[in-house]
Amino acid sequence: MAELATLARPYAEALFKASSAAERGALKEQVAALAALAGSAELRQFADNPKVAASQVFDVVAGALQHKGGAALHAKAANLLRTMLDNGRLAALPEVAAQYAALVNAQSGVSEALVESAFPVEGAALTEVVATLEKRFGRKLAATVKVTPELIGGIRVTVGDEVLDTSVKARLEQMRLALVA
């Protein structure tokens, strides 16, 4: 997907440069919501129809976003969407969202963390886990929790290219390797 990353980079950088520090958090959320909508096969099929104008696709996406979250589309997010639709780059929107989030996180000193757990982690337990992980990785983390029953117990944390795996599955695999060695 290097091609999508190459297509997405100028859009993400332009949005980052055009937005103020105060706007970036809200824009990050809206662009992520737009990316989720753009990932829909039905929307892509609608947008790829030559009989459908870019303005119609924009109206559908903006309407769906407003219906879903209730908030109106930010002017800069709307400009991004219009530009991408006019250039036929709707498929690159999820990558734009990922790159924009990475730029915002890098500027604010926050790293994305994927916390995989066999069971849901919420509330105070999540806060405690994130605090411990922030000490372990030495930086502020924005955690996303994913339930992965195959882990049996424990957690697996991915921050960038670093992985901390304390799951029961990983420990069983370590024991298996030790026994066959």
Image (cartoon, rainbow, N blue to C red):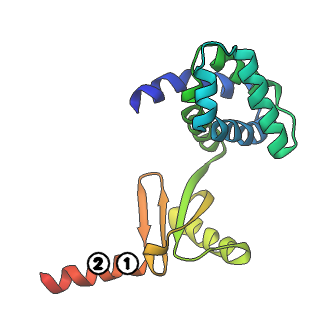
User: In the image, is 73 to the left or to the right of 176?
Assistant: right
Q: Please name the residue shown 51% across and 62% down the image.
A: 137
To which quarter of the image does residue 89 belong?
Answer: top right
> Which residue is at the front of the view, 99 or 91?
91
Instruction: Please tell me whether residue 53 is drawn above or below residue 94 in the rendered image.
Output: above
Local SS, label 2? helix
24 is higher (above) or lower (below) than 57: below
Q: Position of residue 82 (x, y in %)?
A: 71, 18
Give coordinates of residue 54: x percent, y percent: 69, 16
- For residue 173, the mark is 2
Q: Secondary structure at mark 1?
A: helix
How many angstroms separate mark 2 from mark 1 (CA)? 6 Å
Horizontal side of residue 92 vs 173, given as left or right? right
**Residue under the point 74% across and 23% down:** 58
Q: Residue 134: x percent and y percent?
A: 59, 65
Q: Do the residues bearing badges 2 and 1 touch, measured as CB atoms within 8 Å?
A: yes
The answer to whether residue 90 is seen in the rendering is yes
Amino acid marked by disc 2: Glu
Which part of the image, by quadrant, shows the N terminus?
Answer: top left
* Mark 2 nearby-residue class (10 Å; few <14, some 14–19, many ≥20): few
What amino acid does circle 1 point to? Lys
Image vertical order of residue 72 relative to residue 135, above or below: above
Residue 166 visible to the viewer: no
Looking at the rendering, which quadrant does residue 59 occupy? top right
Q: Where in the figure is residue 106, as x and y percent of width and height?
A: 59, 42
Residue at point 87% right, 40% down?
71
Question: Which residue in the structure is indicated by mark 1?
Answer: 169
The image quadrant that residue 152 belongs to is bottom left
- Judging depth in this view, the residue of 16 and 69 nearest the camera is 69
